[in-house]
Image (cartoon, rainbow, N blue to C red):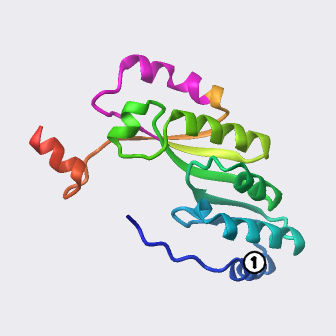
Amino acid sequence: QKTFNFKSPERCVEEFKELIAMGTTSIHILDDAFNIKKERVSTMAKLFQSEGITVDWSARGTVETREEVISDLGVGGCKRLHVGIEHLDDEVLAYFKKAQRFTHIEKFCKLCEKHGITILGYFIIGAKMETDAYRRDLPRRIEELGIKLPFFNTLSPLSETPYYYQLLKD
């Protein structure tokens, strides 16, 4: 549903070099879905490696289940992926209209651990079908998945969104 405008891997490498020359010690890529174009991620990672770029860097991405993408990110020096996991219940993920399911999240977490990437995971609390048991067990489940940096938001309707109109209807 979105249109993405990506810089070339070569341009990203040049920008990293410029930032490092200014004394930057950490870089965060704010693309909405940094890792959705496999070839771009792979090329960028290989260029970072060949250019000797070792700065601490992270990116905002999506739950990724292609091992070659996670592997390339790890080889390229990516330290953290900031990902909207949202929820660990398939029914709620469907309600949020997320394509991923718990099995995808679980695989993503295993791949990140294997390739040395820390997950900063965003979670949403407060879906109407969410249970007390889910909320009680959530910290343990996050820990079991190996998510080191969980962030939590309370579900709130933004006006003029489908969720807002559904709440008015309900």
| Side of 44 relative to 30 (left or right) | right
- Please tell me how many numbered marks the rendered image carries: 1
Image x and y of residue 93, in percent: 40, 38
Query: Is residue 148 visible in this depiction of the protein?
Result: no
What residue is shown with label 1?
13
Image x and y of residue 94, in percent: 37, 39
Query: 110 above or below 137?
Result: below
| Side of 24 relative to 109 (left or right) | right
Kindly identify the amino acid type of the residue bearing the numbered disc 1.
Val
Image x and y of residue 11, in percent: 69, 83
Toward which corner of the image does residue 118 lie, by quadrant? Answer: top right
Image x and y of residue 15, in percent: 71, 80
Front one among 97 and 52: 97
Toward which corner of the image does residue 148 lie, by quadrant? Answer: top right
Q: Residue at x 56, y 43 (%)?
A: 121
Magenta segment boundaries in residue numbering: 123-142
Task: Name the image quarter holding the C terminus.
Answer: top left
Instruction: Say whether residue 125 is magenta.
Output: yes
Instruction: Say whether residue 124 is magenta.
Output: yes
Which residue in the rendered view is the most extreme toward the left? 169
Q: Residue at x 57, y 39 (%)?
A: 104
- How would you rate the neighbour count of disc 1 (Cα within 10 Å): few for under 14, some for 14-19, many for 20 or more? some
Task: Name the image quarter holding the N terminus.
Answer: bottom left
Toward which corner of the image does residue 140 lie, by quadrant? Answer: top right
| Side of 20 relative to 104 (left or right) | right
Query: 42 above or below 125?
Result: below
- Label 1's element? helix
Q: Residue at x 52, y 33 (%)?
A: 102
